[in-house]
Image (cartoon, rainbow, N blue to C red):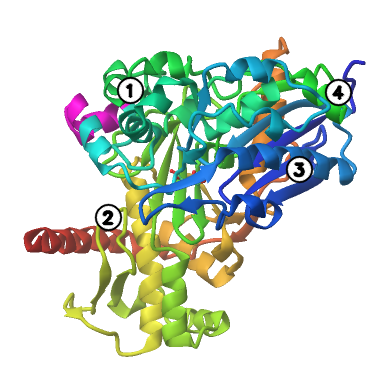
Amino acid sequence: MTLKDECTYLGIDLSTQQLKGVIVDENLQILSETHVQFDSMLPEFRTHSGVVRADKKTVTAPVLMWVKALDLLLDKLRVCGADFSKVAALSGTAQQHGTVYWQIGAENILHSLDPSNFLHSQLASCFSISHSPIWMDSSTTKQCQMLEEAVGGAEKLAEITGSKAYERFSGAQIAKIAETKPNAYANTERISLVSSFACSLFLGSYAPIDWSDASGMNLLDIQKKEWSQACLQVCGSNLESKLGEPVPSYTDLGPINEYYVERFGFNPHCRIISFTGDNPASLAGMRLGANDIAVSLGTSDTLFLWLSEPKTLPEGHIFVNPVDSDAYMALLCFKNGSLTRERIRNLYCSGSWDEFNRLLESIPRGNFGNFGLYYDSQEIIPFVQGDFRFDKAGSSVSKFTSPEFEVRALIEGQFLARRAHAEDLGFSVGPGTRIIATGGASNNKTILQVLSDCFNAPVFILEAANSAVLGAAYQAKHGRLRNNSNENVTFSSITSCVPVPVLACEPYKNSAKIYDPLVKRYRKIIKEIQTRTDSRS
Ligand code: XUL
C-alpha cells in the first residue's frame, strides 16, 4: 500500500488534564478529533486534574496513565470513524518540562511490542520512576540555585539556556531525582521529556528530544543547539547519554512502529515527525509570524513572540523556534490574568461581564488619568503583589471614586504591562503587525478593543481553539514534506491553506497619543513599586 493524494495527518497532544488527537486532511481541515480525560476516564490512577500532589510543592503524574490513555485514544478515534491507513505522518505535543525515566532494557520492549496486547500492560515495568515530575512541581529550589551557581549566576544561565533557573524546568527536576533516588537514576537508560516520551511510543524506540522543548530544560545551549556541558554536569552523572542528541523540531524520525500497523491499521509508510512542547506547538498552530504577537488571555495571560535573535531575559523564556530552527520564540507568562479580571468583575459588577463591559466603555481611553495595577497573586513579570492605584496627579489612592475607573484601570494596566514587557524583547508595532488573541477572554470584544488601543495595533482572533494539537498536525505535514521533497518547503508555505485569523478590532486613531505616554508611566510606577518592595524586604 502506498500513500496517494488522499492522505491525512494526525496530531496528538498529551496535556496536563487530557490526551487529545486530531486528524486533518491535506488542506489541514479537521476530519476527526477526540480526547481522553485522565480523571474521569482513567479513575484508577486517582489523579485530580491529571496530577498527583504529594505536598504543596511536589506534583507528578503517573506515566502509565499516559500510556493507557494512548491505548484508549486510538480506540476512540477509530470509533469516531478515523481511517488510520490514510495517515501519512503524525506528530505531537505535550505539556512542557515534565520528565520520563525509562528503565534499563525498556527500549528492547519498545522494539518488540505485541499487537495483540495493550501498550500499558507491555510497558508496565519500563519506567524507573513511576510518577513523572511535571511542570506544576516547584520542589527544586535547591537544585535551581546549584544550577545557577555552576554557570556563574542567573543571568549567565539565561544567556546560555534561554531562561534563568526555574523549579519546573527539567534540569533541576532531573538533578533532584539523581540526588534523592540514586538507584532509580542509575537504573535509567533514557530520560525523555513528556513530548519525546509520547513520540517514542509511536516510534517503537527512543525518540530524540527536539530543540524547542529542550529549551525548557535549562540544559540546552540555545545558540549552539547542543547540550551545555556545564549544566549537564551539575544535574546528574552520564546525563548526556541518558538524554540522547537533540534534533530540530520538524525532524522525520522514521516510520511508525509495526504495532500500530497491525493493531490499528496504520499505513506502514506513516512517518513520525518529532514531537515538541505545547507552547512551541501553539505558536505553530496559530501560524505566528515575525510581525505578530500572540496574546493568550486565560487563567494567566501568556505572550508569544517570534524572535530572529535570542535575547537574555530577566524573567520569561526564550525557546528555539519550532517551525524555523534559525529563529527563536519568546514566552512571557503573567500570572494575574482572568482570575484578577473576575475578581474586579465580582467586586464592582455583581459578577456580570455585560455590566463590566458597560463600565469599561463608559469611560474614555486613558481613564481620566486614573491608573491601576492589580496583582492578586505574586506576579512573575514583574515580581510584585497587591493592588496599586494612582490618581491623575500621580498620588497613590486606596480606591477610585467610582467602579468604572476600577474596571478601566484594571484592563488598561494589564495591557500596558503586556506591551511594555513585549517591547523589552524588541517588539514594536509596525506595518502589518497583528495581535492574535486566544483564550477565554478573547471572546470579549470590549476587552479586545482596549488591547488593540493599548498596543495601537489590530487584534485578530482564531476560529479554531486547541492551537497546540493543531500545531502538531500541521507540523506532521511540514516535517513529512520538508524532509521528502526537493522543493523549498517552509512551514508557512505548507500552512497557507489554513483560514487566516479574523479581524476583531482596530485601534482608534488617537491611541498612540494616549497610550505611548502611559507605557512610560507604567514603567515608572512599576520601578517605584519594586524599589518600595525591595527596601521593605
Ligand atoms: C510553560 C509551562 C506550561 C506548560 C503547560 O513554561 O510550564 O505552559 O507547558 O502545559
Query: What residue is shown with label 2?
Result: 382
Residue lying at 60% horizontally and 23% vertically, measured from the top left:
250
How far is disc 1 from disc 2 in space, using C-alphas?
32 Å
Residue found 35% across the figure and 63% down from its top: 515
- Label 3 – label 2 distance at C-alpha: 42 Å
| Circle number at residue 262 | 4
Q: As drawn, is 408 to the left or to the right of 394?
A: right
Which residue bears the numbered disc 1? 236
Q: Which of marks 1 and 2 is nearer the N terminus?
A: 1
Instruction: State the CA–CA distance, disc 1 to disc 4.
Output: 39 Å
The reply to whether the residue tagged 2 has its Cβ within 8 angstroms of ligand 1 is no
Residue under label 3: 72
**Ligand 1: does it lie within 8 Å of the C-beta at label 1?**
no
Hey, what amino acid is under mark 4? Glu
Q: Residue at the location (30% across, 16% down)?
A: 229
Q: Are marks 1 and 2 in contact (CB under 8 Å)?
A: no
